[in-house]
Image (cartoon, rainbow, N blue to C red):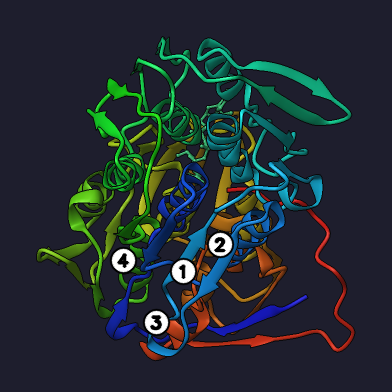
Amino acid sequence: MDKFVIRGGDPLLGTVRVSGAKNAALPCMAAALLTDEPVILENIPQVRDIQTTRNLLAAMGADVELGYGRAQHRTTLHCKTLAAPEASYELVKTMRASTLVLGPLVARCGRARVSLPGGCAIGARPIDLHIKGLEQLGAKITQDHGYIEAAADRLKGAEIVFDKITVTGTEDLLMAATLAEGETILQNCAREPEVADLADLLNKMGAHIHGAGTPTIRVKGVSQLKGAKHRIIPDRIEAGTFIIAAAMTGGDLNVAGCDPSHLGALLSKLHEVGVKTKSSADSVRVMGDNPFTASDITTEEYPGFPTDMQAQFMALATQAEGTSIITENIFENRFMHAQELVRMGANIKIEGRRAVVRGKTPLSAAAVLASDLRASASLVLAALVADGETIIDRVYHIDRGYEHIEEKLRGVGAQIRRIGEMFPKKAAAPARA
Ligand code: UD1
């Protein structure tokens, strides 16, 4: 299992480039299942979840082609015939977003068999809303031996109100509805930019979708979709992580290739804390070296403060003067990074869904354990300002969603290196984010 060794204390200086959004790329890859023509996706990040999805599609019979050299962020997915519309436990257990293939498979093939996601590091994360919605579209769903089986001759448009806002649930049903007979109205939808990006791709493929990015999405079903070419939006969570890294290290960093309009809640909170930034159309410059003041956050669905930035904000809060209260509203049990930050010298108390962070506390290097994707990012941030050399174990979690993070950080002045074990063990623990 690889580890990161990070020596803290260096400001981040220069320009770092943001990759494509993993959470937009995953549903867009699943959308390729809806057509027998090739779908070309650009700005695909090179992260492990993407590789898992490629394997998943290839196992179903898709032709998966990778770009080489300068085109390595492009992938062509051609699902001409789908011999096995099935997602096995082996693949689903490492990435809960595999559930995204359920809707497209049943819509295109009339049947799907997808393993139920296993236990999860950041809470229960059920998929009941995906299932309920597909049933409303006319699919017959059964559960057997840990698998969900869905069958339908042709899905039928329906009016569906999500009981709770779910990102992948919205995406799954949106994809299914494109090939349903008649009109589907989805209400109480997730408004994340990744949902809108998926709808953009689907519309290029010939779908009729209106309202993606708002709570109500209308889909007029068509009988067939065609191939398309699409560029994935920038990763707002990766961008946010670099912005906080620059602020914490007192650097002067240009976070390039991002979309500041997707970072509204984060940037306004950071300004409250005392972080200075300047945004252009596609970059954010962070000018660090200011004292930080404590501030409270509550995670919410987009456009609120993202749960995927909560752990990184907690690392920043340890360096702010005063008490910050962090309330996690989206997932239970998403504070596993807190105990590791405490081992590095932070003062954090967990009270149910609230974390109380008292700062400013100096951080000192320690051996710490990454527990999930975003938790790992917060440990990297803490290590960048800690006194001494921090060793972060289980960085396979961070590799699921951050493209070559150590190379990007090293490129702007961080002292970070990856070391492998002499006798590598297979990564076993399931991980989600
Ligand atoms: C997506 C993101 C993840 C992010 C999360 C919240 C992807 C691939 N992942 O995850 O990075 O942290 O949104 O912004 O895009 N829920 C149910 N029943 C369901 C589905 C969800 O109760 O059928 C609950 C979940 O347990 C959770 C809440 O709804 O409490 C939101 O989850 P959801 O938006 O579905 O998260 P994901 O789509 O899994």
Q: Are marks 1 and 2 in contact (CB under 8 Å)?
A: yes
Q: Are marks 4 and 3 in contact (CB under 8 Å)?
A: no
Circle 3 or circle 2, nearest the eye: 3
In the drawing, what numbered circle is on residue 50? Answer: 2
Could you give the CA–CA distance between mark 4 and mark 3, rounded to whole angstroms? 27 Å
Give the SS element for disc 2: helix
**How far across and how far down the image is residue 38, in percent?**
44, 59
Amino acid on which the number 1 mark rests in the picture: Thr
Could you give the CA–CA distance between mark 4 and mark 2, rounded to whole angstroms? 24 Å
Amino acid on which the number 3 mark rests in the picture: Ala
**How far across and how far down the image is residue 57, in percent?**
62, 55
Q: Which residue is denoted by mark 3 in the rendering? A: 71
Could you give the CA–CA distance between mark 1 and mark 2, rounded to whole angstroms? 10 Å
Q: Which residue is denoted by mark 4 in the rendering? A: 243
- Mark 3 sits near ligand 1, with its Cβ under 8 Å away: no
- Residue sitting at 79 percent across and 31 percent down? 147
Mark 4 surroundings within 10 Å by alpha-carbon count, few (fewer than 14), some (14 through 19), many (20 or more): many
Amino acid on which the number 4 mark rests in the picture: Ile
- Which quadrant of the view contains residue 297? top left
Of the image marks 4 and 1, the number of the one nearer the N terminus: 1
Circle 4 or circle 1, nearest the eye: 1
Is residue 276 left or right of 73 when viewed as pictured?
Answer: left
Q: Which residue is denoted by mark 1 in the rendering? A: 75
- Which quadrant of the view contains residue 225? top left
Could you give the CA–CA distance between mark 4 and mark 1, rounded to whole angstroms? 28 Å
Give the SS element for disc 4: helix
Could you give the CA–CA distance between mark 3 and mark 1, rounded to whole angstroms? 9 Å
